[in-house]
Image (tube, rainbow, N blue to C red):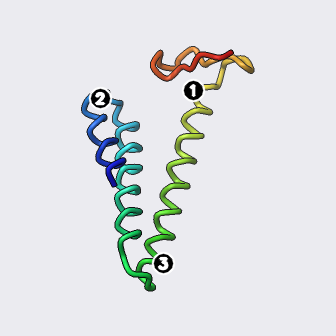
Amino acid sequence: MLVAVALLVIQLVIRPRRKELLKNALLAATFILWGIVQLMPQNELSLKLGNVVVTLFVLDLAWTILLNARLAQGSKPGELPANLPAEASVERR
């Protein structure tokens, strides 16, 4: 759950765009829910909430993939997209 709190706090520092903020808030909420499920006794509710957590993680991953695919449109294979923020680029070796 501390990961979720750290993710929310870092949003204050990096000030992402609204869509990115929403995506990060969803991810943080998913981590918090996952932490709650881990502390719950195993019962039908915890199993259902565990399934919700997995679904939310998959949704976040799909959202990230689609966002990166959109950014990569128009760039050549193996080349970083021109519209990728400088902070997000990774040095390639």
Q: What is the three-letter code of the residue carrying label 2? A: Arg
Is label 3 in a helix, a strand or a loop? helix
Left or right side of 65 for 19: left
Amino acid on which disc 1 is placed? Leu
Q: Residue 26: image x %, image y %? A: 39, 51
Q: Position of residue 12 (x, y in %)?
A: 25, 33
Viewer-side residue, 51 vs 42: 42
Q: Residue at x 32, y 50 (%)?
A: 2
Instruction: Locate the N terminus by quadrant.
Output: bottom left
Image depth: mark 1 or mark 3 in front: 3
Q: Decide which of 30, 74 is in the foreground and name it.
A: 30
Q: Reply above or below: 32 against 64.
A: below
Q: Is disc 1 placed on a helix, strand or loop?
A: helix
Residue 6 placement, left or right of 77: left
Please indicate whether residue 25 sits to the left or right of residue 51 in the image: left
Q: Residue at x 72, y 17 (%)?
A: 76
Residue appearing at x 46%, y 63% in the figure: 53
Question: Label 1, on which residue?
Answer: 71
Residue 47, numbered label: 3
Q: Which residue is mark 2?
A: 15
**Percent of width and height locating residue 85:** 47, 19
Question: Tag 3: residue type?
Answer: Leu
Q: Quadrant of residue 80?
A: top right
Q: Label 3 crowding class (10 Å Cα cut-off): few <14, some 14-19, many 20+? A: some
Lower sequence index among marks 2 and 1: 2
**Percent of width and height locating residue 81:** 60, 19
Of callouts 1 and 3, which one flags the residue occurring earlier in the amino acid sequence? 3
Residue 42 versus residue 59 in the image, above or below: below
| Residue displayed at 35% across by 31% down | 17
Q: Residue furthest bottom?
A: 43
